[in-house]
Amino acid sequence: MSAATIIRKELSALRVPPNFADYAAERARFSWDAVRRALAEQGAGRVNLGWLAADRHAQGPLGGKPAYRFLSAAGAPRDLSYGELSRLSSRFCNVLRGLGVGRGERLFVLSGRIPELYVAVLGSLKNGSVVSPLFSAFGPEPIATRVNLGGGRVLVTTDELYERKVAKWRDRMPTLEHVLLVAAEGGATNVPGTLDLATLMDAAADDCEVAPTGAEDMALLHFTSGTTGTPKGAVHVHGAVATHWATGKYALDLHPDDVFWCTADPGWVTGTSYGIVAPLLHGVTSIVDREEFDAERWYGILRDQDVSVWYTAPTAIRMLMKAGAEIPRKYGFPRLRFIASVGEPLNPEAVRWGQEVLGLPIHDNWWQTETGGIMIANTPAFDIRPGSMGRPLPGIEAAIVKRNEDGSIAFVEAPDTEGELALKAGWPSMFRGYLHNEERYRKCFAGPDDAWYLTGDLAKRDADGYYWFVGRADDVIKSAGHLIGPFEVESALMEHPAVAEAGVIGKPDPVVGEVVKAFVSLKQGFVDGEALRKELLGHARKRLGAAVAPKEIAVLASLPRTRSGKIMRRLLKARELGLPEGDLSTLEAGG
Ligand code: AMP
């Protein structure tokens, strides 16, 4: 990288002294134990994410400070103070207790960004129940699959989403006992087989005894997609809070007076770790917008809400870039001081666009569902190499490795050499397993004493220790920042009577990173045509929801398979993109 393209930072030019100013010294002095001690206010051996996030500040001077400001197009902003959040989440905890829902039992949440969701997540954690967020743009099939895999006993959702996505599938979710509904239009709900959440909340007491959970107790279950099979439930524990706090400090540079806006939906891990937990731990005010992306609206929020730290995603930034520079020029963002982004590769032009149009570069950072928190980041004080994800945070050791045939790994020391990104196991928010799939979990670890977690991402490290994303080592698709498992999409297509085989790939897209493209072959008696392709897309959309369903479909006479019968997605992709087909030695004859 030429020196000219590096974005230089001057400490003296930063408006607020950064929390992380000396890379080597801070890493050397950092210890997870010190962070754990700083958060150990609950007494010996007790750690509860819900208490630390919702209650810790409620009794002190921050009790009246807004924890959240909820925005919607329809009404005035609604603030929820730390004190109210504590009381309401205690009520929710009592609602669960009234229903006999106890520690370790699983609760799913499926809703847009409404206050009840945040209250339910924190109240469940205080109850010691395990929370699993579902994305509200999922269709009925991904919802049912996850609830069943997780053994969900409770679902919190809205009347509207329930009618549209759950009611007809309810009998396919045998573990689901209680459905708690929020009325989309306010007031009470009256839907057979469900309970009205507002009525239960009204009757519940304002305080609760927080469950005596320990650091290793399960707190959150985040589903993530792999190449094959059903989604994997990544298990996260209450002790993850130490990472949420440390990364809020180092990667997001949160200071007490910040107004923080994390645009990620709480249906995904970023929206939980950084839309809920980390900002509350730091006692800042978070903005939550109920509406979908709209460039003008977003610039308006940045300015009118005095957002100072903004955590967003490459797809959103590319959509803002597409909307043009005139709109932001009309606005101006005097309070904005730090912008970070995660979830997909952030192209260098986007980093520089931030600098030119918003007056601040975009700081890329990297992590994934399994890591529970940010691991590698660009932060306010350090130079940015546009296109790089930054450097490992304090408490995080990263490496580039190659897997050997015998399952061992070799460390790649030479700079700028591609390999798999690995992390030294042991940071507090590391996942503790894939639910019911110990073997798959074990496979993620290698090296001496299995001390290294292999991330499944390919990357390079340059001579100065900056990491550069290269691609995924597997076939999962990232579309608009959401991880999509091709198997889940293929399975839904296979359920259509016309489909004989299905293979699904991510096709590069300039705005959303990748779009889902499906290839199918047809059963005898069915003929390709626009009407059939439309029907197949419609079928997939109905089952999977807009977030997961393919946007494009092609019909082939047959799909390329390996001799062992597996569909060769890589070959489908290479052919789609006109790239070299690579090693075809395992291709079945005629493929
Ligand atoms: P998820 O588990 O859904 O959060 O997705 C995690 C995956 O998203 C990672 O394994 C990467 O493949 C990708 N990802 C996350 N952050 C970045 C980034 N900054 N640059 C490139 N890819 C990223």
Image (cartoon, rainbow, N blue to C red):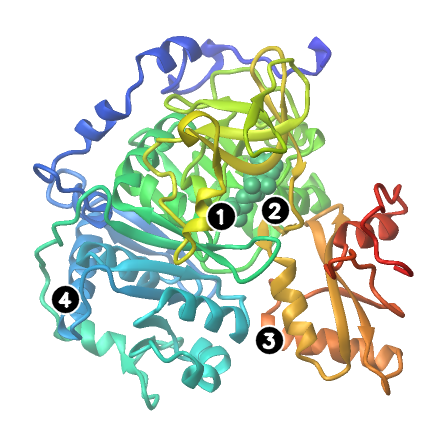
Mark 1–mark 2 CB contact (< 8 Å): yes
Residue type at tag 2:
Ala
Quarter of the image with the C terminus in it? bottom right
Sequence-wise, which precedes: disc 1 or disc 3? Answer: 1
Mark sitting on residue 263: 1
Q: Circle 3 is placed at which residue position?
A: 543
Sequence-wise, which precedes: disc 3 or disc 4? Answer: 4
Point out residue 330 in the picture as x, y percentages from the top left corner. 62, 40
Q: CA distance from mark 1 to mark 4?
A: 30 Å
Q: CA distance from mark 3 to mark 4?
A: 35 Å
Mark 1 or 3: in front is: 3
| Residue at image point 43% right, 12% down | 23
Quarter location, residue 569: bottom right
Viewer-side residue, 570 vs 131: 570
Viewer-side residue, 336 vs 220: 220
Badge 1 local density, few (<14 within 10 Å), some, or many (20+)? many
Quarter location, residue 20: top left
Point out residue 576 in the picture as x, y percentages from the top left corner. 86, 53
| Residue at image point 29% right, 46% down | 237
Q: Circle 4 is placed at which residue position?
A: 94
Viewer-side residue, 111 vs 581: 581
